[in-house]
Image (cartoon, rainbow, N blue to C red):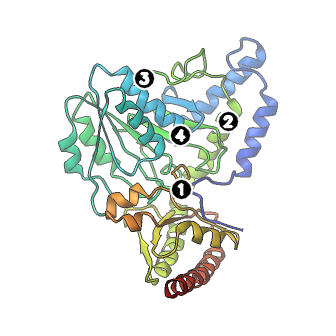
Amino acid sequence: MIYLDYSATTPVDKRVLDTFNKVCLDYPGNSNSLHSLGIKSKELEDYITNKIGDILKVKPTEIIYTSSSSEANNTAIKGICFKYKNRGKHIITTSLEHSSVIAPLNYLTKHGIEVDFVNLKSDGTVDLDHLKSLIRDDTILVSISYVDSELGIVQPIEEIAKIVKKNPKTFLHVDCTQAVGKINVDFKNIDLASVSAHKIYGLKGVALLIKKENIVIEPLIHGGKSTTVYRAGTPAIALYASIMKALELIIPNIDKNIEYISKLNKKIINKLEKYDNVFINSTNKSVCNTINFSLIGIKPETFIHALDAHQIYVSTKSACSSAESMSNSVYAIYKDKNRASNTIRVSLSYLTTEEEVDEFLKVFDECYNKLMLKRGNNENN
């Protein structure tokens, strides 16, 4: 098996799973209970939250545990809009955002919120001058992903933050789901940020919303005491411990992983660029983990199934996108519907070996030639 879909989800690190299992067995008490088992669990909960704060360089009081980045994104966006509705009803975002950002924005437009999309430059990064021109007195939120899930484009968040901060009424939300663990992220100038465990070799079902202390949001989930007033639910301490462990393992190795994965990235792109019907969509601003390309003349689903037959696993777009739709991200940059309708995403990891890359390229060549020949025969008949 050759797994090349790490942007969709990552395999669980055994050390993370071991941590989860140990906490499940050793800490049965509800951390909000007053008995000794509850106090023991509360002490561990506080340790975990403090440790995550140390790793991410944020305050423990700024950490909200959620079930997913989708929940974190929804909580941040709706929470700001509902709490600060008297300030304004204008939001700015990009065409590269995950569906868990676009969907709540679409929902909010039905409730009077106005959404503008900032222009992108040819490399996929935000046009900062256009962003400046879009910010109004009633702009309450700018929501931009640090690294998008389809092309892996890294946005200049520090520069964006400086622009946003010039309007004291505007908050900056950054979806860091595809960024944490792949690049070094500084949360200092970000008001709200989303982080997920299953993208960094952790468990599905736990994520974080980082919310600066001075910001108040309306909760998405109401219903009693938890780790914070901003998200109700029984504290899932074993899951919290698991994301702590995942962060602890991945963050110190980012630079080393980038150096290794970059070599694999260059090898794949250098090979793919030689095919007449392959167009690389990732830009020089994309993370090395993500290679997005369009394969013209062969349906992406057909090619993916051909690779699947060899136990090689890649994807078309973001795992949360509709399979039938074209890639809005690719279209936003290249303005080419054919190109945007035929995208394939290969996503790499520090776990990916050079032997796996060589085998992928070998099988890719076989499938490409076979399917192109079949296409040519069909056109001649």
First in sequence: mark 1 or mark 4?
4
Relative placement, left or right, of 20 versus 373 is right
Compute the Cα span from label 1 to label 4. Answer: 21 Å
First in sequence: mark 4 or mark 2?
4
First in sequence: mark 3 or mark 4?
4
Residue 217 - label: 3
Residue 323 - label: 1
Residue 364 percent across, percent down from the top left: 59, 78
Label 2 secondary element: helix
Q: Is residue 96 something one can see in this rendering?
A: yes
User: CB of mark 2 within 8 Å of CB of mark 1?
Assistant: no
Relative placement, left or right, of 283 versus 87 is right
Residue 234 percent across, percent down from the top left: 66, 22
Which one is in front in this view, the residue at disc 1 or the one at disc 4? Answer: 1
Residue at the (47%, 45%) spot, across then down: 99
Compute the Cα span from label 3 to label 2. Answer: 24 Å
Residue 239 - label: 2
Tell which of 71 and 225 is nearer to you.
Answer: 71
The amino acid marked with disc number 4 is Ser
Tell which of 100 and 341 is nearer to you.
Answer: 341
Residue 135 percent across, percent down from the top left: 22, 38
First in sequence: mark 3 or mark 2?
3
